[in-house]
Image (cartoon, rainbow, N blue to C red):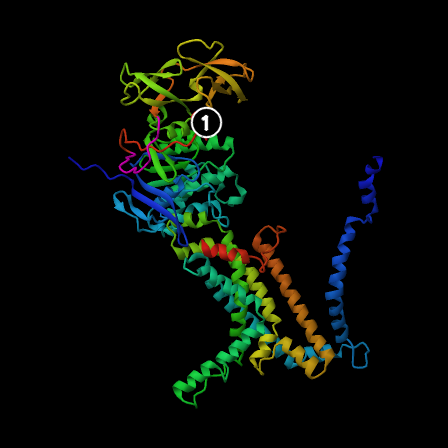
Amino acid sequence: MTALAPARPAATGALPRMPAAAWVLPPLLVVLGCVGWPLVTVLGESVRDRAGAFSMASWSAVLGSAEFHNALWRTAQIAVGSTVGALLLGSFLAVVLAFVPFPGAGLAARLIDTVLALPSFLITLAFTFLYGSAGVLQALVHAVAGPGAQLPPILTSPLGVILAEITFFTPFVVRPLLASFAMLPREQLEVAASLGAGPLRVLRTVVGPEALPGLAAGGSLVLLLTLNEFGIVLFTGAKDVITLPVLIYTRGVVSLDLPGAAVVATAQVVLSLLLYGVYRFGFARLRGDGRAERPTDPTEGAGHVAVVAHQ
Amino acid sequence: MTAPAAPAVRLEEIDVDYRRGRASTPALRELSIRIDAGRTLALLGPSGSGKSTALKVLAGFLRPSAGRVYLDGTDVTDLPPARRGIGVVVQSYALFPHLRVDDNVAFGLRARRLPKAVVAERTAEALEQVGMAEFGRRLPRELSGGQQQRVAIARALAIRPKVLLLDEPLAALDIHLRQGMLAELQRLRGTLPDTAILFVTHDQAEALALADQIGVMRGGRLVDLADTGELWHRPPSRFTASFLGGANLLPVTVLDSPHPDTATVRLGAAEFLANAPGSWPAGASAVLAVRPHALRITASTQGPDVLAARVTGAQWRGPTTRLTVAVDALPDLLVEVDQPGENTHPIGATVGLHVPARAGVLVPAEDAPTARSSGVDVAGADPPSARVPEPRAVGEPAP
């Protein structure tokens, strides 16, 4: 009988005793191994010449080139244009899904969610079938206006890339917005209406301010993703649309200028981190008094979609 | 001779159904009420009885599936909430968290596009009215629950509504704040002589303190409606008697009716004199509704108006003790009695249950189904009462 008593202390004592702070090591090692090490490698590659010696020549050459400046400008143009477009379209869709009762709203919300599960190039591929030089729309133009009639090459222009990115990234705005709307107490909307506010005023003065964090979260995520988007640009076949990711691909894979590609990649990483920092700082200010709150995670809220749609 | 003024509020034969897909759940059936200007009607009932639904229909948040809504004699059934001019205060306050207190109060005035000077003046006036003038630049999150409630009331009053709807306005407050706000609402009522108020609550004490009339709701129907005092002293149905004041319901037989509104009734071997509004023929079965505070416990089990009983439970509540006793003559019946001070009767003790003369009131043995509640007039006197079957066991504690 006495053998039963010490069983638990003995089992506890068999566990390795580690200070609580040590548990930070496993995730830290994973991050360093999977993210830190490749980044350091890229940075190291950018400061070596072809002989392997330390050199800043690649940095001088790349950062001073018109090609880099143009790519940077084009990247910013497309990212900002796509983000603004996704914010406008996403806000409209989210408002309709959340506040306009119509049959099939839940299905529509789930369809929009489904877009998130698709690879970005697939949307672009569909665009080429629809709007490309041999696409459905072009065939329609031929049928109506004759074989000589041609659509303007929108798909292979920066505008085409922006339209494709708006199509793909709009759900990233819709989801956090729907989550914000779902958290908005219905009584606030009812009281606002009873006080004499019409739907537009309610949207502007009650819903808008409350949804601002969700809008900022979705917009920031889209800006980050469009800044780094490669597949959509590649699949539109827009040869003249050179963005930073395309420039990295061209230098690294086509020209085999690995140091040059590493410089552009490093610049791209710095740009992304800066943007993320601005987002976190701006979000903290937006939430007021710098409280340490988690920003709305744009990947959350799928469950709210149906809830809002059914209300 | 001038025509009587139209009531401030009139709901006529209102039905509401909640639909989900093809399924439909009735939430309100044939509700008809009137509230005159300057009067307060409390809708009282348990959760799910339809009282908040009635308020939402009046505010325009819900569209009735049948019936009409009139404000000052004008049919507003098809008008959106924004065009009804009704002030609404809800349980959760629903203050706009990103707006400061004065901007919250000014919200309705700005929605009406009033001049800035008027907005400022009426905002200050409304905040003054609820004693929140110094808190104009605070954000809602910087206020206590009671202060937030005052701001919500000021916001509703700022638009100078002819009708004010209060949906469980005290439910979210703790007991001390609730007492203070109750007094505050009574004071406010005095400052709004022309405003009709619909007050929705599940708390009978709030309804008794604030309302001129009380409508008791159950299962989506109005079961009784009368002046507050009338409903308390002469509940027309078993449900109202038990819900309003937690009356014990003792099955009795009417012996005779020696005076108007009085009857002698028998329970077991005991006989009591009871209030008996209406006509009660000898030999009729009835229920004596008698509240716990009106009963007495005696050491003796002898006497013409004393029932032998056994103590089965005791809850000390400070000033009083609520005893639960089992009456020998009524198997399966538990009766609640409030006694002053601490309990002096041990559990299991045999005691006498004394029913003083006219301590209780007779109500029908069975509540009639509420087929219709139409024509019930909040402003009128002595309304016809609709009655529903009573599911609680006789003498079971009130909800």
**Residue A106: within the magenta?**
no
Left or right of residue A136, residue B376 in this image: left
Residue B290: % across, % down: 40, 21
Numbered disc 1: what chain? Answer: B
Q: Residue at x 74, y 78 (%)?
A: A259
Residue B99: % across, % down: 48, 49
**The quadrant where residue A204 appears:** bottom left
**The quadrant where residue A70 appears:** bottom right
Q: Is residue B3 above or below residue B336?
A: below
**Magenta span: helix, strand or loop, mainly?**
loop
Q: Residue at x 73, y 69 (%)?
A: A39
Q: Considering the image in quadrants, where does the N terminus of chain A appear?
A: top right
Residue B127: % across, % down: 43, 40
* Segment tinted magenta in the rendering: B365-378
Left or right of residue A305, residue A260 in this image: right
Left or right of residue B369, residue B136 in this image: right
Residue type at the position of mark 1: Glu
Q: Is residue A209 visible from the viewing direction of this image?
A: no
Most extreme residue toward the left, as rendered?
B1
Residue A20: % across, % down: 77, 49
According to the picture, the residue beneath numbered tag 1 turns out to be B396
Q: Is residue B54 visible from the viewing direction of this image?
A: yes
Which residue is at the front of the view, A95 or B391? B391
Q: Is residue B40 above or below residue A249?
A: above
State the SS at label 1.
Answer: loop
